[in-house]
Image (cartoon, coloured by chain):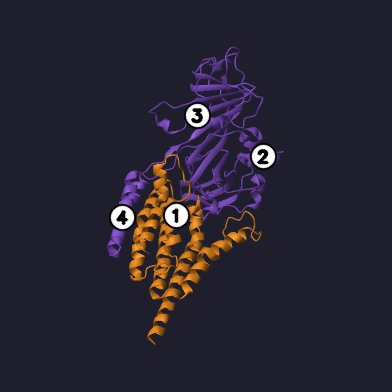
């Protein structure tokens, strides 16, 4: 059964890149580095004191095309340090538990990574274009041209390096009404808080770095030089029913009935019941959240948009999606 | 290279960041911008053309090509850094790519300056640029290698600057860390240059004999 669930998850999502190994560390050493070859590495910042001996369980970004069943066939991550001994793959892999608890949620549509990667500004582009014209004019004086090319290039590098990525991550909490566990899914470009159970990267096979610190070895950062990261983990299902919102203030809510018609309900404040459907046209639910959802089931979709000017604004906000959500009588707008 | 070729290659090297700035909705993917800037130079500068550097000292032609490739290359490197690329890996890739460009450009200029009728450099270029790339692609279509093996044929194919460049330019290619391939592409360019120089000297000696 678990093999079937794993196969299903691999079909609809990507490979998990969060597998755990057990290891032993004997101090003194400043940090633990586990080399996973082309797949990347894990770095746990220490320090470990003289005489200190610890047994740890750390995530590594290895690819395992056959999932947990194929781990034993993979070479163990290496450590160059004599103070670190990798004992083997952990018997308990959190990814297995997540697949068992929430198999269907993997297949549902996911939030896109908003914003985009850093791109050149007009100042450095103009600099490079002007430099190109000058260099063509100076081609009879090659040494001067080389110096000018290097200078203009260095300046363009400094300007371009300062371009900040409009990095926005998005979070989706996805669950089925009546269940106690929800799937929390976070997407980000280049960097992401390390999830506890499942990590995907696109393009598949990209090199990953997992960065942890000794003070909180179960929490850290996942990084990739180019690509989109998706972290998945199980969380308690939000306390949300049509009669009362005990989860969080939501800036917009939509419901879909079993026939597939979407309705807009507007903001849904904390502690209040879901408002009636607005007869006038409101903003439609985003396309990514509504496509490929199971037919014949009622659904709630809600969004918590961070306030303008808040530091959280740089993120894409939180989305809540509940399957088999039952609207209270009179809220459906019929 | 003639001025119009230099200008065209320069514009091609800056095309991706230029188009992305002009059209904010456009995204040319997650590949290295420094690699995309160097691509047109690796494609066009070492082309065995009659008149490629003829009439000027080969060192001058190499310096001008190197100078003109630097602004776009470093602009791309800056963007890669802003996107989170590792400075050490980026420095290695840019250094290798630029050195390979200069060496092949020097070989092309030397060949053009000593008499384009001699066919050694065009043959070398044909074998090591399009030849290996076509061979690599063709062999990918037959089940010669293990499916799923990410390696693109190892060191032999890394002699081809286009194959090496393609590995670097694709998303995540910068961090693939294939040092041996970096070394192979530089050695291939160095050997190509030395061969052209040796043949040019021999041709000159024959002419004066």
Please determine whether, in this image, residue A180 is positioned above or below residue B11: above
Please determine whether, in this image, residue A12 is positioned above or below residue A240: below
Mark earlier in primary sequence (2, 4): 2
Measured in 3D between alpha carbons, the distance from the residue under mark 2 to the one under mark 1, in whole angstroms, is: 37 Å
Which element type, helix, strand or loop, lies under badge 2?
helix
Q: Nearer the viewer, residue B29 or A204?
A: B29
Q: Which residue is mark 1?
A: B35
Q: Nearer the viewer, mark 2 or mark 4?
A: 4
Measured in 3D between alpha carbons, the distance from the residue under mark 3 to the one under mark 4, in whole angstroms, is: 49 Å
The answer to whether tags 1 and 3 share a subunit is no
* Percent x, y of residue A233: 57, 35
Please determine whether, in this image, residue A127 is positioned above or below residue B114: above
Q: Which residue is mark 2?
A: A8
* Percent x, y of residue B114: 39, 75
Which element type, helix, strand or loop, lies under badge 1?
helix
Q: Nearer the viewer, mark 3 or mark 4?
A: 4
Check residue A318 in the rendering and tell me which mark sits there, or answer none.
3
Mark earlier in primary sequence (3, 2): 2
Q: Chain of mark 3?
A: A
Measured in 3D between alpha carbons, the distance from the residue under mark 1 to the one under mark 3, in whole angstroms, is: 36 Å
Q: Which residue is mark 4?
A: A133
Q: Is residue A156 visible?
A: yes
Q: Nearer the viewer, residue B135 or B185?
A: B135
Q: Tell me if A199 is positioned left or right of B206 in this view.
A: right
* Percent x, y of residue B55: 34, 71
Q: Nearer the viewer, mark 2 or mark 1?
A: 1
The answer to whether tags 2 and 4 share a subunit is yes
Callout 3 environment at 10 Å: few (<14), some (14 to 19), or many (20+)? many
Which element type, helix, strand or loop, lies under badge 3?
strand
């Amino acid at each position: 059964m678990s093999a079937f669930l794993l196969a299903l998850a691999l079909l609809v999502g990507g490979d998990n890149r969060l597998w755990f190994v057990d290891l032993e560390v004997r101090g003194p050493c400043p940090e633990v580095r586990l080399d996973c070859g082309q797949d990347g590495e894990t770095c746990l910042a220490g320090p470990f004191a003289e005489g200190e001996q610890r047994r740890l369980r750390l995530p590594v970004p290895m690819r395992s095309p056959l999932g947990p069943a194929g781990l034993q066939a993979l070479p163990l991550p290496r450590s160059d340090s004599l103070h670190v001994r990798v004992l083997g793959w952990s018997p308990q892999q959190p990814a297995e538990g997540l697949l068992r608890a929430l198999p269907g949620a993997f297949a549902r549509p996911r939030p896109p990574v908003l914003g985009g990667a850093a791109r050149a500004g007009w100042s450095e582009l103009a600099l490079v274009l002007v430099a190109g014209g000058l260099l063509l004019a100076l081609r009879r004086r090659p040494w001067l041209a080389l110096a000018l090319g290097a200078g203009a290039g260095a300046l363009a590098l400094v300007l371009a390096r300062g371009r900040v990525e409009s990095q926005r991550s998005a979070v989706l909490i996805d669950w089925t009404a009546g269940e106690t566990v929800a799937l929390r899914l976070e997407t980000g470009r280049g960097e992401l808080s390390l999830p506890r159970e499942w990590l995907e990267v696109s393009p598949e096979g990209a090199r990953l770095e997992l960065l942890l610190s000794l003070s909180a070895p179960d929490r850290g950062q996942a990084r990739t030089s180019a690509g989109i990261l998706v972290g998945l983990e199980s969380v308690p299902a939000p306390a949300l029913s049509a009669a009362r919102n005990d989860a969080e203030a939501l800036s917009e809510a939509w419901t879909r009935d079993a026939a597939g018609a979407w309705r807009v309900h507007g903001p849904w404040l904390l502690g209040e019941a879901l408002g009636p459907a607005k007869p006038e046209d409101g903003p439609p639910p985003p396309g990514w959240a509504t496509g490929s959802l199971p037919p014949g089931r009622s659904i709630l979709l809600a969004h918590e948009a961070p306030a303008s000017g808040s530091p959280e604004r740089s993120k894409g906000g939180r989305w809540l999606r509940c399957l088999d959500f039952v609207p209270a009588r009179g809220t459906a707008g019929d | 290279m003639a001025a119009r070729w230099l200008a065209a290659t320069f514009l091609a090297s800056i095309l991706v960041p230029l188009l992305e700035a002009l059209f904010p909705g456009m995204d040319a993917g997650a590949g290295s911008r420094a690699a995309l800037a160097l691509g047109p130079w690796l494609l066009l500068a070492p082309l065995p053309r009659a008149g490629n550097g003829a009439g000027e000292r080969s060192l001058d032609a190499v310096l001008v090509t190197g100078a003109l490739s630097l602004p776009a290359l470093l602009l791309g490197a800056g963007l890669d850094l802003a996107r989170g690329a590792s400075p050490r890996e980026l420095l290695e890739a840019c250094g290798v790519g630029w050195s390979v460009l200069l060496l092949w450009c020097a070989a092309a200029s030397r060949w053009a300056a000593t008499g384009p009728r001699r066919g050694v450099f065009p043959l070398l270029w044909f074998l090591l640029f399009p030849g290996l790339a076509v061979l690599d692609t063709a062999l990918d279509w037959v089940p010669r290698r293990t499916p799923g093996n990410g390696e693109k044929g190892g060191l032999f194919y890394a002699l081809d600057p286009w194959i090496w460049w393609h590995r670097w330019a694709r998303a995540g290619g910068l961090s693939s860390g294939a040092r041996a391939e970096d070394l192979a592409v530089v050695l291939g360019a160095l050997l190509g240059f030395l061969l052209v120089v040796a043949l040019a000297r021999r041709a000159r000696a024959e002419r004066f004999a």
